[in-house]
């Protein structure tokens, strides 16, 4: 390698080190450059020893700067992670009171919400109690209990919304998963309660029939909406799969590291988007199946 070429590589490395907004693949590109320059020094001849010494010193200064920057980023990441854990613990202590806090992220996420414990422990009791309800006062009492769970659920969501930006993605995802699980159980309790309420008030035929018609209309409208959404999602899936296949074909014949890297990024994004669309399709199909089953049961 000519010393002019090696100097040019050092110039490029200086540009990498000074980059203010690194993109995906930045560190790989930078350390590959460091490796290439380091190997270049072994076989490159400079007219003057002082020139080579100066180039070597410049190279080492840039490597030191890169290492310092890497450590700084790692430290910020550690601080972010520690802060997220502290905030997560604060949420648990605030919403769950005397419940011991587990260091395990998954367990902590499940313990964030008092309503989760309440619903989880009482839903079977609620449902079994509903089977024996016969009077309006019994229904009112049960409704009050469910409304109390609603209020606790609102507080839990409020705590999450207030502090979610302070959580790292893993903590945020598990906290949200616990919230959704609690909400689904509470919704299930409400669904059973409403079903029993309808049976309690069967004597009010006209009102019951009106409720049935409204319910059917909502389910039918929901089915139509979900069918349209499903068709749209399937079309989007076909487009994304075709685009992904196209990018994969381009990658096979792509030249140039930068272009290949962009293609690999597009492929990764495409795969993630396709998986998200498939999950959305699966959820929508599940909703349609549930709604159609509800209509069949009417």
Image (cartoon, rainbow, N blue to C red):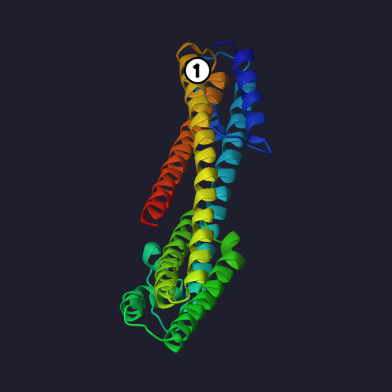
- Indicate the position of residue 279 as horizontal and vertical percent values: 43, 42
Q: Quadrant of residue 294?
A: bottom left
Counting from the top left corner in percent of width and height, residue 3 is at 60, 14
Q: Please say if 135 is above or below 25.
A: below
> In the displayed structure, does residue 270 sit left or right of residue 285?
right
46 left or right, relative to 252: right
Q: Nearer the viewer, residue 13 or 180?
A: 180
Residue 32, how many percent across, how many down? Answer: 50, 27
- Is residue 148 at least partly visible in the picture? yes
Among the 4 quarters of the image, the one containing residue 154:
bottom right
Point out the image quarter for the C terminus: bottom left
Looking at the image, residue 69 sits to the left or right of residue 278; the answer is right
Measured along the vertical axis of the image, is residue 72 above or below residue 158? above
Viewer-nearest residue: 68 or 262:
262
- Tell me what residue is drawn at x 41 percent, y 63 percent: 181
Numbered label tally: 1
Q: On screen, 236 above or below 111?
A: above
Judging by the rendered image, the residue that carries numbered circle 1 is 246
Residue situated in front as seen by the camera: 139 or 55? 139
Residue appearing at x 50%, y 15% in the figure:
250
Q: Nearer the viewer, residue 273 or 206?
A: 206
Rendered residue at 61%/35% (across/down): 23
* Quarter placement of the N terminus: top right
Where residue 41 sits: x, y (%)?
A: 52, 20
Neighbour class for label 1 at 10 Å: few (<14), some, many (≥20)? few
SS label for mark 1: helix
Is residue 86 among what the camera can see?
Answer: no
């Amino acid at each position: 390698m000519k010393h002019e070429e090696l100097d040019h590589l050092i110039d490029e490395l200086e540009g990498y080190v000074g980059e203010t907004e690194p993109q995906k693949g930045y560190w790989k590109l930078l350390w590959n450059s460091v490796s290439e320059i380091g190997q270049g020094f072994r076989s490159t001849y400079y007219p003057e020893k002082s020139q080579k010494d100066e180039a070597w010193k410049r190279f080492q200064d840039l490597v030191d700067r890169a290492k310092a920057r890497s450590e700084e980023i790692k430290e910020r990441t550690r601080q972010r992670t520690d802060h997220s854990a502290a905030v997560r613990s604060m949420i648990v202590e605030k919403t769950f009171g005397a419940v011991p806090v587990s260091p395990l992220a998954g367990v902590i996420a499940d313990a964030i919400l008092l309503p989760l414990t309440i619903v989880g422990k009482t839903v079977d009791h609620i449902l079994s109690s509903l089977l024996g309800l016969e009077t309006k006062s019994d229904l009112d009492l049960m409704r009050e209990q469910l409304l109390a769970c609603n209020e606790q659920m609102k507080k839990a969501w409020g705590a999450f919304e207030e502090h979610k930006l302070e959580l790292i993605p893993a903590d945020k995802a598990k906290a949200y998963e616990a919230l959704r699980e609690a909400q689904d159980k509470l919704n299930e309790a409400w669904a059973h309660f409403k079903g029993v309420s309808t049976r309690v008030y069967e004597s009010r035929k006209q009102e019951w029939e009106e409720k049935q018609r409204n319910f059917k209309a909502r389910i039918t409208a929901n089915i139509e909406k979900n069918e349209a959404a499903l068709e749209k999602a399937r079309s989007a899936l076909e487009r994304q799969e075709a685009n992904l296949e196209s990018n994969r074909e381009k990658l096979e014949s792509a030249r140039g590291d930068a272009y290949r890297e962009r293609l690999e990024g597009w492929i990764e994004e495409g795969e993630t988007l396709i998986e998200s669309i498939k999950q959305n399709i699966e959820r929508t199909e599940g909703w349609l199946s549930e709604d159609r089953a509800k209509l069949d049961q009417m």
